[in-house]
Image (cartoon, rainbow, N blue to C red):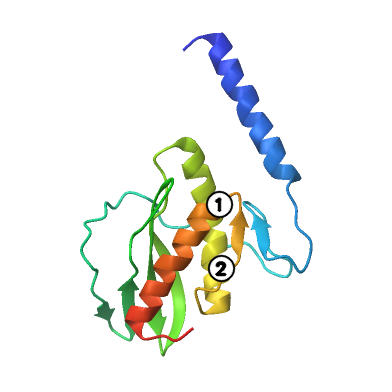
């Protein structure tokens, strides 16, 4: 790779990061920017699990149970940028965790969006205890697929939202 190309990539990356830093929302909106944290909440303490490597087989996943918990996978939802699929863990009829099984990751931009939006969508789902979650700005397709996969998992777990 030439020095000029590396400089171009670096400048483009810094430009995108600068644009992301300027995004903001105001209270009362239903959209948050990728990388932002909703007012009154704290960011996740740990990194999300690895994302986007499990291929979809087209088969309907069946619920599996562990001691005291019910683990259920939602449908793999195809989006313009790749499949989105989540797994929920339910204890006592309450969703206690949402894990990404697949998020778009075939391109660097998709990986970046997924790594920013995934934790926000997880937090939103846990707060809402339903698939009625806010769309993350800049991750519209991922947010829509996440909500659909989440709803199918909730339906399989017998949780009314």
State which tag comes first along the sequence, 1 or 2. 2
| Residue 104 higher or lower than 30, as above or below | above
Q: Position of residue 47 (x, y in %)?
A: 50, 56
Q: Secondary structure at mark 2?
A: helix
Q: Position of residue 126 (x, y in %)?
A: 53, 74
- Decide if residue 146 is on the left or right side of residue 158: right
Q: Secondary structure at mark 1?
A: loop
Any mark on residue 123, and which? 2
Please name which of the two marks, 1 or 2, marks the residue nearer to the observer. 1
Residue occupying image coordinates x 39% and y 81%: 90
The number of discs equals 2
| Residue 119 higher or lower than 151, as above or below | above
Residue occupying image coordinates x 51% and y 38%: 109
Q: Position of residue 11 (x, y in %)?
A: 65, 23
Q: Can you tell which quarter of the image residue 66 is in?
A: bottom left
Q: Is residue 37 visible?
A: no
Task: From the viewer's side, name the closer residue of 81 and 65.
Answer: 81
Any mark on residue 139, and which? 1
Q: Is residue 16 visible?
A: yes
Callout 1 environment at 10 Å: few (<14), some (14 to 19), or many (20+)? Answer: some
Task: From the viewer's side, name the closer residue of 7 and 110.
Answer: 110
Callout 2 environment at 10 Å: few (<14), some (14 to 19), or many (20+)? Answer: many
Q: Can you tell which quarter of the image residue 150 is in?
A: bottom left
* Residue at the far bottom in the pictured view: 92
Q: Position of residue 79 (x, y in %)?
A: 42, 52
Residue occupying image coordinates x 55% and y 10%: 3
Are the residues tagged 1 and 2 within 8 Å (C-beta)? no
| Residue 66 higher or lower than 16, as above or below | below
Any mark on residue 55, and which? none
- Decide if residue 52 is on the left or right side of residue 96: left
Q: Alpha carbon of mark 1 to alpha carbon of mark 2: how far?
A: 15 Å
């Amino acid at each position: 790779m030439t020095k000029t190309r590396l400089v171009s990539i670096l400048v483009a990356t810094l430009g995108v990061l600068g644009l992301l830093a300027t995004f903001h929302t105001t209270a009362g909106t239903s959209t948050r920017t990728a990388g932002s944290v909703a007012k009154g909440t704290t960011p996740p303490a740990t990194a999300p699990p690895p994302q986007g490597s499990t291929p979809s087989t087209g088969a309907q996943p069946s619920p599996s149970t562990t001691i005291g918990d019910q683990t259920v996978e939602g449908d793999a939802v195809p989006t313009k940028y790749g499949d989105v699929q989540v797994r929920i863990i339910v204890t006592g009829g309450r969703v206690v965790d949402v894990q990404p099984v697949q998020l778009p990751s075939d391109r660097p931009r998709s990986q970046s969006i997924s790594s920013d939006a995934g934790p926000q969508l997880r937090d939103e789902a846990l707060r809402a205890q339903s698939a009625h979650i806010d769309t993350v700005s800049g991750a519209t397709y991922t947010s829509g697929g996440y909500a659909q996969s989440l709803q199918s998992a909730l339906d399989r777990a017998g949780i009314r939202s």
